[in-house]
């Protein structure tokens, strides 16, 4: 089954996301900050990355996604965000934010599974 890296500083989000995805047979690795997140991605080469926007700094997730792409890490990225609710902005994938999908927190288990499966299946076909 696919390996998913979840990078988020909120232990409740890590636990809930891990529990939901493990129940569907996915292997999960986690990190609570951008530096450890970078390290687990480089070490384990996951099939999918779930990345929070705001960690130690409000834009850590953006910078980490950019760093992955600059280093030719093309693993699909789902970005967790609550930014649009806080600032009224709507995000879409682009060069500045090089991710494959955005997910507004909180996310339902069904929606998380649907988004993960869509990107995992898409990656397998490539």
Image (cartoon, grey):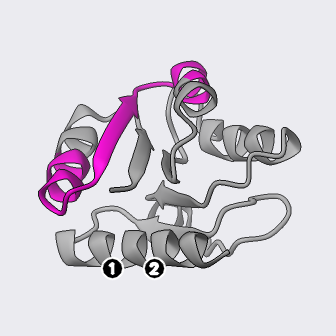
Q: How far apart are marks 1 and 2 (CA)?
A: 6 Å
- Report the residue marked by disc 2: 118
Left or right of 69 in this view: 4: left
Q: Which residue is drawn at 59% across and 22% down?
A: 39
- Residue 76 pos. (x, y %): 60, 61
For residue 85, what is the image quadrant? Answer: bottom left
Magenta stretch holds residue 31: yes
**Pointers 1 and 2 in contact (CB under 8 A)?**
yes
Residue density around tag 1, few if under 14, some if 14–19, many if 20 or more, within 10 Å: few
As drawn, the label of residue 41 is none
- Report the residue marked by disc 1: 114
For residue 108, what is the image quadrant? Answer: bottom left
Residue density around tag 2, few if under 14, some if 14–19, many if 20 or more, within 10 Å: few
Left or right of 81 in this view: 62: right
Residue range highlighted in magenta: 16-39
Q: Which residue is drawn at 41% across and 37% down?
A: 8
For residue 68, what is the image quadrant? Answer: top right
SS assignment at label 1: helix
Q: Say which quadrant the N terminus sits in.
A: bottom left
- Residue 103 pos. (x, y %): 44, 68
SS assignment at label 2: helix
From the viewer's perspective, is residue 70 above or below residue 99? above
Q: Which residue is drawn at 19% across and 69% down?
A: 109
- Residue 3 pos. (x, y %): 40, 47
């Amino acid at each position: 089954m696919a390996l998913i890296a979840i990078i988020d500083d909120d232990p409740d989000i890590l636990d809930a996301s891990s529990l939901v995805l493990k129940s569907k047979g996915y292997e999960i690795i986690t990190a609570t900050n951008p530096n450890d997140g970078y390290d687990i991605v480089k070490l384990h080469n996951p099939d999918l990355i779930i990345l929070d926007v705001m960690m130690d700094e409000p834009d850590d997730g953006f910078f980490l996604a950019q760093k992955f792409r600059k280093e030719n890490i093309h693993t699909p990225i789902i970005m967790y965000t609550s930014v649009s609710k806080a600032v009224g902005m709507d995000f879409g994938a682009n060069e500045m934010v090089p991710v494959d999908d955005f997910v507004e927190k909180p996310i339902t288990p069904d929606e998380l599974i649907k988004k993960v499966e869509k990107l995992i299946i898409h990656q397998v076909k490539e």
